[in-house]
Amino acid sequence: MHKPSPTIAEDIAAVLSLKPGGPHAFAGAARWGVAPAAAPAGRAGGEADRLTRVYVEVTTRCNLACRTCVRNGWDEPLGEMPLALFRSLIAQLHAGAQERAGAQPPTLVFAGYGEPTVHPELLEMLRLSKDLGARVEMVTNGTRVDAAMARGLIDLGVDRVWFSVDAVTPERYAAIRRGGQLAEVSDHIRGLYHERLRERRILPEIGLAFVAMRSNIDELPGLYRLAMAVHASDVLVTNLLPHTPDMLDEILYRRSIGMGRYSQSHEVPRVHLPRIDFDETTGPALLALLGRADNLDLAGADPAGQSDYCPFVQGGATAIRWDGRVSPCTPLLHAHPVFVASRWKHVKDSSFGSIAEQSLADIWASDPYAAFRRKVQAFDFAPCVFCGGCELDESNEEDCKGNTFPVCGGCLWAQGIVRCP
């Protein structure tokens, strides 16, 4: 029997390892019918306040000088988390699990504004995390995941390693990830996969993270080939968040940044499209329509994707800086400059306490932190992302609705434009 050709939605879902409604659907996936039509509903009651994911920044040091990095625009001291402080965190999480009658501890994600593998005690930290019984993930540039590191990750049972790979051609990779070599990183990714095969292990899963820009978007097919070769479980494509003026021309969302404003709106007609093949016949007409219409329904999916939805707060996540300070998300770990579309903004860091001074459980349950999470779940902030901009939009300290620091109306994570593993 003749097997029908896959639709473009199925092609893209396969290429990017996306599941309909999955947590890593990239901002443009809904355009092709592989992302949810609306943001997931916030978890109700006490479940909304259950801590399920902890981002741990063990260092702000890095061995590369990437064009996309926040370091090109900030001036903060570098540092790394002392092993004693990390042990304290593990003890706090263990105590919390015991208090909840042996409940599963939160997932620990080794990620932040530095490269985890440069920390000299990384493997010991990973061991402590797995001994706790936690799911453990790590985000790395891959340059230091050599054979010895790969064996360590496999022996410890680390659940997933995300490799940041912004190009699959040597020249372009070197231009973006300055100081790195594609051949070395590719060998390390493949080495981890083959060592896992030799050891007959299924962990760690391999994930690939890709920052999409005007100069590298044509690398996606090659990224897929790499993902297939190493049996990657997920590919996460995110947009660029510029920290310096020279990166402004690289963004791919100047128009789509405003799509959320008209999603489900009565201001413009809503166009309903079925699942449909994307080929030489349909392509030109569909592209012309998708380039003009702001209020679309594509086989039940909304191309505007998620809007006014914080993946950190709604996902029960928190972030811990290398010095122990606790932030509600990774974007607020450090003060830094960003450009939202073409508008400059200074993002002030936010903290609700330090694990060096009180337990993470007490910080999480504190009135100020709980009130902030409720405010973010309601997301009654000024629509700074869609607005033309005013002097209040130059920082995250207050907005025109009377909200005070930290305000989130200008956050690109909350609009599904920028994503994190």
Image: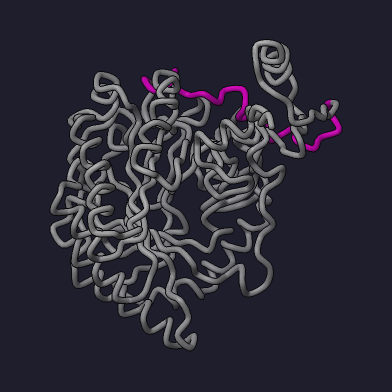
Toward the viewer: 209 or 280? Answer: 280
The picture places residue 392, in percent across and down from the top left corner, at 56, 38
Residue pictured at 47% horizontal, 36% vertical = 238
Residue in view at x 60 percent, y 35 percent: 29
Judge from the rendering whether residue 355 lies leftward or rightward of residue 115; answer left or right.
Answer: right
Q: Decide whether residue 349 is among the magenta residues.
A: no
114 sits to left or right of 41 = left
Find residue 263 and report its horizontal and vertical position in percent.
Answer: 75, 35
Name the spot of residue 107 as percent of width and height, x first: 42, 65
Magenta run includes residue 263: yes
Question: Can residue 405 be seen from the camera position used here?
Answer: no
Nearer the observer, 337 or 167: 167
Determine whether, in the image, residue 92 is placed left or right of residue 414: left
**Residue 312 visible in rendering:** yes
Residue range in magenta is 246-268
Number of marks in the image? Answer: 0
In the rendered view, tell whether residue 99 sits above or below residue 79. Answer: below
User: Where is the N terminus found, in terms of image quarters?
Assistant: top right
Residue that extends furthest to the front in the rendered view of this protein? 1
Instruction: Give the answer, above or below, for where 172 lies relative to 266.
Output: above
The structure residue drawn at horizontal position 44% and vertical position 72%, both measured from the top left corner, is: 363
Q: Quadrant of residue 212?
A: top left
In the image, residue 133 above or below residue 312? below
Q: In terms of image quadrants, where is residue 95?
A: bottom left
